[in-house]
Image: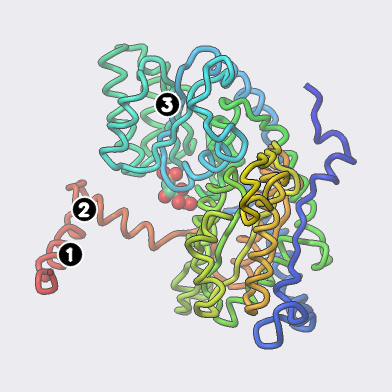
């Protein structure tokens, strides 16, 4: 199949655009708006951040910067595996959590039919798709009610190879598979994990599972463009080479030394100025159902990367910006009241789509009701676009910071661009905030407490600490 990304003109036409007018004083007023001078003030710091990220490319925790370029053989292997799965499996289930689940969910929602699983087989042309991003027993039971394990391929994804939630999902599924299929159970599991650490790789080797590796320097929330996201996407029939080409295109943009031509870097500076002015909430609001779960993916990368107690010199800083997900237009009828009139503590990022993949005309009718009839003859495309512009305007006149990232279309190339855009923005923000954006010590402590509560060996001291803490509770129940 001809590749769009090989056409330079097409590629250019798919470039994401950042409109930040409504972050500026001219548009939202003196009190809240930024000045060009403020942006310019950040120029040297932004240059430093750019230089620093550049010098770390492909090293340490920045191995993800190379994913658009260094996976030729892996992509070929993934495509082969996916082809086979598409032919034989009735369902494909991702077992994983956090960074090992949110990317596959976001890409599925963005690039597949919005009711994909309900489509007839001959239209879908591939297995049904599920992601178990939790350990809610009702969710597991519900999954088992709708799949036949013997016709399903399970992709166990965990970078650490040790996450309790994922290993719990695996234990339950593997037992069921063994009961039904005996030795052939191992043909139904694909492991995606670290090559060198954790339990999953050992189990995979012992059981002979097909395995894909997550490079050491690719953390969970930066792993969507590795086999973590590429295998599920390929199984869904998504062109993963287009996705990687989109990421490479955004990579080029994000290396531009001119701040005003480097959207992810400029966006970082805008967010920095906002944070320094006490705007501690970042609302991600796509005007597209397809991008609904991209907002979830964004929430994780922004929260877990930037929410930190200490800076790189170990000073206590307690920084971060709370991400919130919203959906246009749905949340105009839920959250927008707060955004326009509540505290001045937010920045809203709209995701807009120039050209939706379909057009729906609003039918003629209600001739005697002018207040309804005005809609007739327009398209839903015009309506959603008008509502986005109206919300943008309503925020701006109330002096509320907002900006818009435009996707010319939603396709594998632009989704690759979008993912890479926010990975870069997060890396730049980590540099400007002088924190380690790639660790998650706050999450680790909770993980250890769970191990202790479930009696894992080696966590006896933690268990005693927890028992003492729980023993004190009781006075404030109602
Ligand atoms: O970004 C991260 O590192 C985390 O959110 C992880 O993705 C999450 O905790 C799951 O970890 P793992 O992939 O090791 O199972």
Residue 103 found in image quarter: top right
Q: How many marks?
A: 3
Q: Are marks 3 and 1 in contact (CB under 8 Å)?
A: no
Residue 432 is left or right of residue 408, and the answer is: left
Looking at the rendering, in which quadrant would you find the N terminus?
top right
Question: Which callout, 1 or 2, points at the residue further toward the start of the chain?
Answer: 2
> In the structure shown, which secondary structural element does the residue marked by tag 3 occupy?
strand
- Label 1: few (<14), some (14–19) or many (≥20) C-alpha neighbours in 10 Å: few
Q: Residue at the location (42% across, 26% down)?
A: 154
Q: Which residue is mark 2?
A: 452
- Label 3: few (<14), some (14–19) or many (≥20) C-alpha neighbours in 10 Å: many
> In the structure shown, which secondary structural element does the residue marked by tag 1 occupy?
helix
Residue 380's label in the rendered image is none
* Residue 61 shows in the view: yes
Q: Which residue is mark 3?
A: 154
Front-most of 423 and 135?
135
In the rendered image, residue 63, in percent from the top left (x then y), is placed at 62, 48
Q: Residue at the location (66% across, 45% down)?
A: 380
> In the structure shown, which secondary structural element does the residue marked by tag 2 occupy?
helix
* Residue 247 shows in the view: no
- Label 2: few (<14), some (14–19) or many (≥20) C-alpha neighbours in 10 Å: many
Looking at the rendering, in which quadrant would you find the C terminus?
bottom left
Q: Residue at the location (36% across, 15% down)?
A: 150
In the rendered image, residue 109, in percent from the top left (x then y), is placed at 55, 39
In the rendered image, residue 471, in percent from the top left (x then y), is placed at 9, 66
Q: Are marks 3 and 2 in contact (CB under 8 Å)?
A: no
Q: Which residue is mark 1?
A: 465
Task: Give the distance between the C-alpha atoms of the residues marked 3 and 2, in whole angstroms.
Answer: 28 Å
Question: Which callout, 3 or 2, points at the residue further toward the start of the chain?
Answer: 3
């Amino acid at each position: 199949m001809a590749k769009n990304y090989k056409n330079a003109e097409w590629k250019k036409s798919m470039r994401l655009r950042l409109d930040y007018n409504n972050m500026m004083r001219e548009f939202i007023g003196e009190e809240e708006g930024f000045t060009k001078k403020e942006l310019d003030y950040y120029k040297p710091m932004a240059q430093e951040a750019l230089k620093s990220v550049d010098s770390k490319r492909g090293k340490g925790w920045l191995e993800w910067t190379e994913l658009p370029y260094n996976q030729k053989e892996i992509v070929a292997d993934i495509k082969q595996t996916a082809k086979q799965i598409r032919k034989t499996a009735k369902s494909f289930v991702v077992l994983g959590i956090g960074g090992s689940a949110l990317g596959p969910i976001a890409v599925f929602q963005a690039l597949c039919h919005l009711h994909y699983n309900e489509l007839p087989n001959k239209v879908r042309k591939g297995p049904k798709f599920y992601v178990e991003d939790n350990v809610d027993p009702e969710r597991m039971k519900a999954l088992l009610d709708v799949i036949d394990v013997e016709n399903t391929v399970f992709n166990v994804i965990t970078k650490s190879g040790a996450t309790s939630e994922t290993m719990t999902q695996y234990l339950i599924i593997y037992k069921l598979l063994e009961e039904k299929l005996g030795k052939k159970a191992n043909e139904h599991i694909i492991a995606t994990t670290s090559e060198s650490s954790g339990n999953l790789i050992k189990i995979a080797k012992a059981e002979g599972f097909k395995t894909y590796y997550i490079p050491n320097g690719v953390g969970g929330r930066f792993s969507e463009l590795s086999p973590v996201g590429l295998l599920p996407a390929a199984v869904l029939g998504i062109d993963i080479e287009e996705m990687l080409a989109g990421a490479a295109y955004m990579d080029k943009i994000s290396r531009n030394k001119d701040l005003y031509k480097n959207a992810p870097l400029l966006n970082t500076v805008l967010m920095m100025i906002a944070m320094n002015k006490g705007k501690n909430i970042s609302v991600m609001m796509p005007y597209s159902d397809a991008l609904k779960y991209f907002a979830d993916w964004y929430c994780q990368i922004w929260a877990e990367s930037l929410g930190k107690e200490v800076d790189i010199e170990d000073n206590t800083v307690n920084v971060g910006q709370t991400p919130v997900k919203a959906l246009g237009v749905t949340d105009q009828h839920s959250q927008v009241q707060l955004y326009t009139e509540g505290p001045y503590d937010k920045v809203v990022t709209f995701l807009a789509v120039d050209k939706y993949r379909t057009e729906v005309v609003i039918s003629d009718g209600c001739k005697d009701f002018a207040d309804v009839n005005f809609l007739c003859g327009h398209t839903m495309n015009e309506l959603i676009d008008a509502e986005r512009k109206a919300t943008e305007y309503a925020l701006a006149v109330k002096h509320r910071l907002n900006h818009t990232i435009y996707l010319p279309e939603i396709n594998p190339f632009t989704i690759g661009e979008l993912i890479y855009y926010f990975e870069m923005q997060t890396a730049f923000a980590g540099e400007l905030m002088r924190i380690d954006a790639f660790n998650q010590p706050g999450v680790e402590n909770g993980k250890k407490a769970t191990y202790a509560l479930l009696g894992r060996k080696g966590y006896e001291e933690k268990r005693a600490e927890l028992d003492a803490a729980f023993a004190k509770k009781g006075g404030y129940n109602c």
